[in-house]
Image (cartoon, helix red, strand yellow):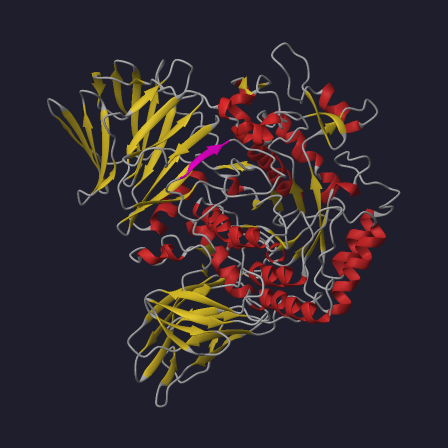
């Protein structure tokens, strides 16, 4: 195509820039300040609602009364909040414990402040506006010290100031460069960090939308092609507070199974049962930990979902059973496209029960994907969702507990790469177009899949992996970052991508380790495996036609290093699992940018090549070929290098040496981590758990929660868990460990947590719960 060549920059191709004219909401005409705060303006109607003292919703509809019950994402209703109302001649002031809204009447403008009078979000000479073509837009003042994070799945650097981003779920196989936008996930939410304080904005609009943090130095905008202007402001003031507030609205991850946190091996494709068995046996023989093998599209009969190719997989039930006895689970791929085949039962049911997407005139929409011409279930309709969920009994009856959703943007092999936007969705009784609901198609497919499997698994936790989603996707699915490539640049880019997804509420996420497309190499795969061992989702996956990249493919030297780090994943499982518990309770990411823990430290604001695991571990991987030395910035505090035990002073940059077998890891002095042990693939539950304490000497006080349960069922909802709130106090003479709270009746395999102190000084006494013990009894 010509636009893909240099012809695109032909001197005759430039277009004259034309100013876009928006109609402002105008002056206030009337207000109703009871319950919902309703405002009638010259060119629109506005409702302001307080969901909590620190969360406010602002909705503007330019034609009608705002719709307040149509969200696909927000899971809670507004609370009855005590709001102080002051109605003056030119302004109205609404005040809660955490927020103050100053509303100018002429023209209508809403500025939001915190309870100390600090500006959070202010409008400019332009505020809420729209165009006659249906586009709506909000203009917000941008401060010189503003830094922007989140926005879901985006390439490029951590800080998105100076970027323009689009939300439109898209299948992008081409290389993911910093300019590649949009990608598979649309999460129209961001966090602003300003002078050490944070606030958040969630733009709850499912149309194609845009965030422009680039075009003007004094303001930014968020806009959508249609619908109403509907956004939530979260007051923070700490980055963690914003995440708790956002996930209060959109939901938090369900506590994942421990097996889903293990190592996953995949390829597009392992094409036969014999190949899968050989693969599994290699992991067992080489004593390389593994929990999951994924099956890509070749396992199916002609790519028909809910089938197995009986020629290549003659006995899937036995395969699943045998691998399960080896400690390995199977996760098959399931795409939304249903092959048009009048002899295919799934297609027959979809047609006969009227479950597929249609045009308004009644014809079924067909698009070409892997099976050929296919129909697509209308996941916006409860009847279709229930049907799709029930169909997964095909898999769960075989012993499968996890599913992988792909191509669910939805991807279609045509020029637009997706479904015709004129297709009508039933939308649970409020029909509307694919133009409006495109971005939630994958989310609703995930909802159907997760809820269906949860009913079928008899109390076990389902695992769902998805490529496409919208805000709230974390309630149902783990997200991987799609079709990356085996380039060092993609390893580098994966860190800010995963961190921004975490900031966007998606705590369980990660890239394809080693890269999906292109041929990986030994050094790249080794370095990427080191990183993957500490990303929330840990899967090695590569594409057909490219080099196999299992850990042993490059010889013993590299295999032994990768094996070491995959084993480390399991040794760190108690720490990881406790962090996932925190994510399920508070919405906090497992893998964090440094600014989340050190928001006052400007050097952390765009730190792309380091990340934190929880609140006290910093990882600084090597992300370039042939490099064995790198600069590492460590924030406030003293930091202990995990391998050497060397102590580094914070608020400084250090040159760290790391040979190929080394991953620089630093633990904050005065804090602790919980570790288990790697036993074997058949026996992954540790017999021994230990707490490594990195002794401080200056009155450091560190508190954390250790959490454990059976890792597989929902029994924890009925009290079958172990939760220990632990504090570690360090001073010159004593290192004190106290269990300050214990809950739950779960009895783990181990009876105590052994305490190991690193860096204990001469004369420094260890006291555990008031006694000179070296362990904590469970």
Q: Which residue in the rendered view is the most extreme toward the top?
A: 361
Relative height, residue 555 to residue 603 (above, below): below
Q: Residue at x 69, y 50 (%)?
A: 542
Give 635 or 438, whichever is nearer the viewer. Answer: 635
Give 579 or 509, whichever is nearer the viewer. Answer: 509
Relative height, residue 260 to residue 336 (above, below): below
Q: Position of residue 326 (x, y in %)?
A: 75, 62
Q: Quadrant of the N terminus?
A: top right
Q: How many marks?
A: 0
In this image, 443 relative to 23: left or right? right
Q: Residue at x 48, y 25 (%)?
A: 207
Relative height, residue 142 to residue 293 (above, below): above
Quarter of the figure with residue 290: bottom right
In this image, 690 relative to 677: left or right? left
Q: Which residues are magenta?
A: 163-167
Whether residue 287 appears in magenta in the rendering, the answer is: no
Give 541 or 117, whichever is nearer the viewer. Answer: 541
Q: Position of residue 310 (x, y in %)?
A: 87, 42
Quarter of the figure with residue 277: bottom right
Whether residue 164 appears in magenta in the rendering, the answer is: yes
Q: Which residue in the rendered view is the most extreme toward the bottom?
A: 763
Q: Position of residue 40 (x, y in %)?
A: 26, 16
Q: Is residue 203 visible?
A: no
Q: Give the overall secondary structure of the magenta segment.
A: strand
Relative height, residue 52 to residue 687 (above, below): above
Q: Position of residue 458 (x, y in %)?
A: 65, 47
């Amino acid at each position: 195509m010509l636009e893909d060549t240099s012809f695109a920059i032909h001197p005759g191709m430039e277009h004259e820039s034309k100013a876009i004219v928006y109609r402002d909401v105008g002056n206030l005409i009337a207000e109703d300040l009871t319950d919902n705060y309703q405002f009638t303006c010259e060119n629109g109607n506005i409702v302001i609602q307080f969901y909590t003292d620190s969360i406010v919703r602002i909705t503007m509809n330019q034609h009608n009364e705002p719709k307040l019950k149509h969200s696909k994402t927000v899971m809670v209703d507004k609370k009855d909040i005590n709001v102080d109302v002051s109605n003056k001649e030119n302004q109205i002031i609404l005040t809660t414990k955490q927020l103050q809204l100053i509303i100018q009447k002429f023209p209508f403008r809403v500025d939001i402040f915190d309870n100390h009078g600090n500006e959070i979000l202010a409008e400019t000479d332009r505020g809420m506006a729209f165009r006659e073509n249906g586009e709506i837009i909000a203009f917000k003042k941008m401060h010189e010290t503003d830094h922007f994070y989140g926005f879901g799945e985006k390439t490029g650097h951590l800080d998105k100031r100076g970027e323009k981003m689009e939300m439109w779920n898209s299948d992008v196989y081409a290389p993911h460069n910093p300019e590649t936008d949009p990608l598979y996930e649309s999460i129209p939410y961001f966090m602003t960090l300003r002078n050490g304080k944070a606030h958040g904005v969630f733009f709850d609009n499912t149309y194609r939308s845009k965030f422009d943090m680039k075009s003007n130095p004094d303001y930014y905008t968020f806009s959508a092609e249609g619908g109403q202007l509907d956004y939530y402001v979260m007051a923070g003031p700490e980055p963690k507070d914003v995440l708790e507030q956002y996930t209060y609205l959109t939901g938090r991850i369900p506590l994942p199974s421990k097996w889903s946190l293990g190592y996953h091996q995949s390829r597009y494709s392992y094409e036969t049962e014999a190949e899968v068995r050989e693969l599994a046996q290699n992991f067992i023989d080489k004593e390389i930990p593994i929990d999951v093998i994924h099956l890509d599209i070749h396992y199916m009969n002609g790519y028909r979902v809910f089938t197995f190719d009986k020629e290549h997989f003659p006995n899937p039930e036995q395969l699943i059973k045998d691998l399960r006895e080896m400690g390995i689970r199977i996760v098959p791929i399931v795409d939304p496209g249903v092959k048009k085949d009048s002899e295919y039962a799934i297609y027959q049911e979809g047609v006969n029960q009227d479950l597929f997407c249609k045009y308004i005139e009644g014809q079924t929409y067909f698009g070409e994907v892997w099976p050929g011409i296919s129909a697509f279930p209308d996941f916006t309709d409860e009847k279709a969702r229930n049907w799709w969920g029930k169909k997964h009994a095909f898999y769960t009856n075989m012993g499968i507990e996890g599913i992988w959703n792909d191509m669910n943007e939805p991807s279609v092999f045509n020029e637009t790469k997706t479904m015709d936007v004129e297709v009508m969705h039933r939308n649970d009784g409020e029909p509307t177009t694919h133009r409006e609901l495109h971005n939630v198609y994958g989310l609703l497919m995930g909802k159907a899949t997760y809820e269906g499997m949860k009913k079928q698994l008899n109390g076990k936790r389902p695992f769902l992996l998805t490529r496409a989603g919208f805000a709230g996707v974390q309630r149902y699915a783990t997200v991987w970052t799609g079709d990356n490539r085996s380039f060092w640049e993609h390893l580098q880019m994966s860190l800010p991508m995963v961190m921004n997804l975490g900031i966007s509420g998606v705590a369980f996420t990660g890239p394809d380790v080693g890269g999906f497309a292109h041929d990986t190499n030994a050094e790249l795969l080794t370095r990427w495996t080191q990183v993957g061992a500490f990303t929330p989702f840990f899967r090695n996956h590569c594409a057909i036609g490219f080099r196999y990249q299992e850990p042993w493919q490059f010889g013993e030297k590299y295999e032994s290093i990768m094996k070491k780090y995959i084993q480390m994943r399991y040794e760190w499982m108690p720490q990881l699992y406790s962090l996932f518990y925190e994510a399920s309770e508070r919405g906090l990411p497992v893998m964090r940018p440094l600014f989340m823990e050190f928001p006052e430290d400007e050097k952390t604001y765009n730190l792309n090549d380091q990340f934190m695991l929880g609140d006290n571990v910093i990882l600084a991987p090597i992300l370039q070929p042939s490099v064995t030395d790198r600069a590492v910035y460590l924030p406030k505090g003293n930091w202990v290098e995990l391998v050497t035990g060397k102590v580094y002073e914070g608020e400084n940059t250090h040159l760290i040496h790391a040979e190929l077998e080394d991953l620089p890891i630093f633990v904050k002095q005065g804090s602790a981590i919980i570790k288990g042990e790697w036993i074997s693939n058949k026996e992954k539950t540790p017999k021994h758990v230990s707490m490594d304490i990195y002794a401080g000497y200056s009155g450091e006080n560190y508190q954390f929660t250790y959490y454990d349960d059976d890792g597989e069922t929902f029994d924890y909802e009925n009290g079958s868990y172990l939760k220990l709130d632990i504090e570690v106090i360090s001073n010159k003479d004593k290192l004190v460990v106290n269990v300050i709270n214990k809950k739950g009746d779960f009895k783990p395999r181990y009876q105590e947590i052994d305490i190991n102190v690193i860096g204990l000084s001469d004369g420094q006494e260890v006291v555990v719960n008031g006694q000179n013990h070296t362990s904590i009894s469970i």
